[in-house]
Amino acid sequence: MIQTFDFANADTSTARRVVTTVPQQALFAMNSAFMTQSAAALAARLDAGTNSQRVAQAYEIVLGRQPSDEELLLAEEFLTTASLEQFAQVLLMSNELMFVD
């Protein structure tokens, strides 16, 4: 995991860290037990209600904001064929959570 996400070597002083974006990072987020457990825990935190309410709550917890109308529509469409845990994993894998703009 350390190599996948370019963490600096703890044994040496590192003034600047190399930054890369590689497919292994996305594969880790899709397949690791850590991410699936995190997604299941997030889904369990969401209160019962409509899909719209759960989507809005998930966005607030993960991204600290409400979803746009388009994001809400896409999420509701996604939830017609996928589970709440899978939606939670999508949010946890999002660039908005992983990277600071």
Image: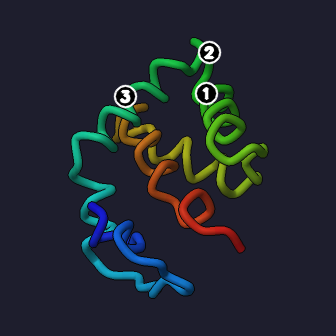
| Residue 65 position by quadrant | top right
Instruction: Say which residue label 2 marks.
Output: 49
From mark 1 to mark 2, how far is it between C-alphas?
Answer: 7 Å
Residue 33 lies left or right of residue 95; in this view the side is left
Residue 84, placed above or below residue 26: above
Location of residue 42 in the rendering, given as x and y in whole percent from the top left corner: 48, 29
For image coordinates 66% across by 35% down, the residue present is 61
> Crowding near pointer 1: few (<14 within 10 Å), some, many (20+)?
some
The amino acid pointed to by label 3 is Ala
| Residue 58 position by quadrant | top right
Location of residue 13 in the rendering, given as x and y in whole percent from the top left corner: 47, 78
From mark 3 to mark 1, how far is it between C-alphas?
Answer: 14 Å
Out of 50 and 11, give the one closest to the viewer: 11
Which of discs 2 and 3 lies nearer the camera? The answer is 3
For image coordinates 55% across by 41% down, the residue present is 76
Instruction: Say which residue label 1 marks.
Output: 54
Instruction: Say which residue label 3 marks.
Output: 40
Marks 3 and 1 close (CB-CB < 8 Å): no
> Crowding near pointer 2: few (<14 within 10 Å), some, many (20+)?
few
Disc 3 element: helix
Disc 1 element: helix
The amino acid pointed to by label 1 is Arg
Residue 79 lies left or right of residue 99; in this view the side is left
- Nearer-N-terminus badge (2/3): 3
Task: Look at the image and tell me in which quarter the N terminus lies.
Answer: bottom left
Out of 41 and 75, give the one closest to the viewer: 41
Residue 29, placed above or below residue 59: below
Residue 4 lies left or right of residue 10; in this view the side is left
Q: How is the image coloured?
A: rainbow
For image coordinates 68% across by 26% down, the residue present is 53
Location of residue 89 in the rendering, given as x and y in whole percent from the top left corner: 41, 45
